[in-house]
C-alpha cells in the first residue's frame, strides 16, 4: 500500500496474481486509477488480473496446439487474447455492479449531473500488465502505465515495451476505455531463453531516477530469486521504503522465473550486476564532469 493511501485512509488499488503450469508461468499486475470517478478501481484491478489469467488458461486448453500455432500467428493471437481479456473483465465488473449497486456513500461525492456523466465501466478503471514465460518463447501485454522487465540467459535486462507516462491531456490508457482492446502494447520473443519476467505497477518505475537504474535494480533482485523467502522479504522491505520516500503510490511486483535456468546462469547475472555497477559509477562521473 502506498504511503499516501495510508495517510488518507484509501484502500490499496493495486492487484497482482500469478499462475504456473507445466507449459507456462504468468505474472500479472493491475493498478486501479486514483481519480474520484474510479471509486471501485480496487475491484476493477482484481477483476483485471483474474480475467487475464483465465483468458490465458483458456487459450492453453490444448497446449500442444497453442505452442504450434502461436509462434506462426502470435500477432493475431495476442490481439485475440487482448480482446477476450477486455470482454471477460467487462463481464466481471458488470456482475459485481449488478450484485452491489452504487450506494449513497459512493454517490455523495458527486452532483447528480456529474454522476450521470460517468460510465459504469469507469467506476472500475484500471491498468493491466501481463508477462508470460512459455516453452520456447515469451510474450507480454500492457494497457496503461507500469512496466514489464525481462532478464535473459546472457544477463541482458530490457523493457520490451515502452513505459507509458500518459496519453495527451493526461489520459492514461485504461481497461475502462471504450476502445480499450486497441490501446494495448504487446511483445513476443522467441529463441531467447528468459530467466525472469517482472511486471510492476507504475509506483515502482517512478521511484527511480532513470531507466538504467530501474533496469539495474531488476538485475540485482534476480540474483536473490534462488531463495524465494529471502527475496520476498527483501523486496517487500524495499518497496515499502520506495513508496514512503518516492511517489507514495501503491506498488505491486509479480515475477515469473525459470528456476533451473536461473541457478545455471546465476554467475552470469552476478557478473552483469558488477558490470552495471561500474557503468553507473562512470555515468555519475560523466555527469559531474559536465
Image (tube, rainbow, N blue to C red):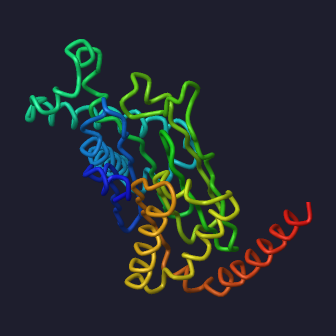
- The residue drawn where x is 40% and y is 26% is 177
Residue 266 x, y percent position in the rendering: 61, 85
Asked if 249 appears above or below 86 in the picture, the reply is below
Left or right of 251 in this view: 97: left
Residue depicted at 62% across the width and 57% down the height: 190
Q: Position of residue 123 (x, y in %)?
A: 27, 31
Q: Nearer the viewer, residue 285 or 273?
A: 285
Task: Depth check: give the residue in front, 75 or 125.
Answer: 125
Quarter of the picture containing the N terminus is: bottom left
Left or right, 98 with respect to 21, comes to left
Residue sitting at x 46%, y 53%: 201
Name the outermost residue toward the right.
Answer: 289
State the residue in front, 238 or 172: 238
Where residue 117 appears, as percent x and y from the top left, is 29, 15
Residue 127 percent location from the top left of the image: 42, 42
Regarding residue 261, the answer to whether it shows in the image is yes
Left or right: 99 with respect to 167? left
Q: Which residue is the extreme one toward the front?
A: 7
Amino acid at each position: 500500500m502506498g504511503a499516501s493511501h495510508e495517510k488518507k485512509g484509501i484502500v490499496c488499488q493495486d492487484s497482482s496474481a500469478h499462475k504456473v503450469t507445466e507449459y507456462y508461468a504468468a505474472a500479472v499486475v493491475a493498478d486501479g486509477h486514483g481519480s474520484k470517478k474510479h471509486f471501485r478501481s480496487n475491484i476493477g484491478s482484481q477483476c483485471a488480473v483474474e480475467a487475464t489469467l483465465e483468458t490465458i488458461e483458456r487459450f492453453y486448453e490444448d497446449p500442444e496446439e497453442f505452442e504450434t500455432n502461436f509462434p506462426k500467428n502470435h500477432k493475431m493471437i495476442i490481439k485475440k487474447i487482448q480482446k477476450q481479456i477486455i470482454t471477460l473483465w467487462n463481464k466481471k465488473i458488470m456482475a459485481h455492479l449488478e450484485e452491489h449497486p452504487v450506494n449513497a456513500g459512493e454517490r455523495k461525492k458527486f452532483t447528480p449531473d456529474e454522476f450521470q456523466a460517468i460510465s459504469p465501466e469507469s467506476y472500475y478503471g484500471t491498468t493491466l500488465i501481463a508477462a508470460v514465460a512459455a516453452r520456447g518463447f515469451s510474450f507480454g501485454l500492457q494497457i496503461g502505465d507500469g512496466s514489464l522487465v525481462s532478464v535473459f540467459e546472457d544477463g541482458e535486462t530490457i523493457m520490451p515495451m515502452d513505459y507509458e507516462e500518459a496519453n495527451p491531456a493526461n489520459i492514461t490508457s485504461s481497461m475502462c476505455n471504450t476502445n480499450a482492446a486497441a490501446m494495448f502494447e504487446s511483445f513476443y520473443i522467441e529463441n531467447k531463453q528468459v530467466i525472469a519476467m517482472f511486471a510492476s505497477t507504475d509506483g515502482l518505475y517512478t521511484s527511480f531516477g532513470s531507466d538504467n537504474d530501474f533496469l539495474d535494480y531488476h538485475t540485482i533482485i534476480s540474483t536473490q530469486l534462488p531463495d524465494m523467502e529471502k527475496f520476498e522479504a527483501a523486496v517487500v522491505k524495499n518497496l515499502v521504503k520506495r513508496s514512503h520516500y518516492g511517489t507514495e503510490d501503491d506498488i505491486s511486483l509479480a515475477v515469473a522465473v525459470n528456476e533451473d535456468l536461473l541457478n545455471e546462469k546465476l554467475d552470469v547475472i552476478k557478473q552483469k550486476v558488477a558490470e552495471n555497477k561500474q557503468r553507473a559509477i562512470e555515468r555519475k562521473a560523466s555527469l559531474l564532469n559536465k
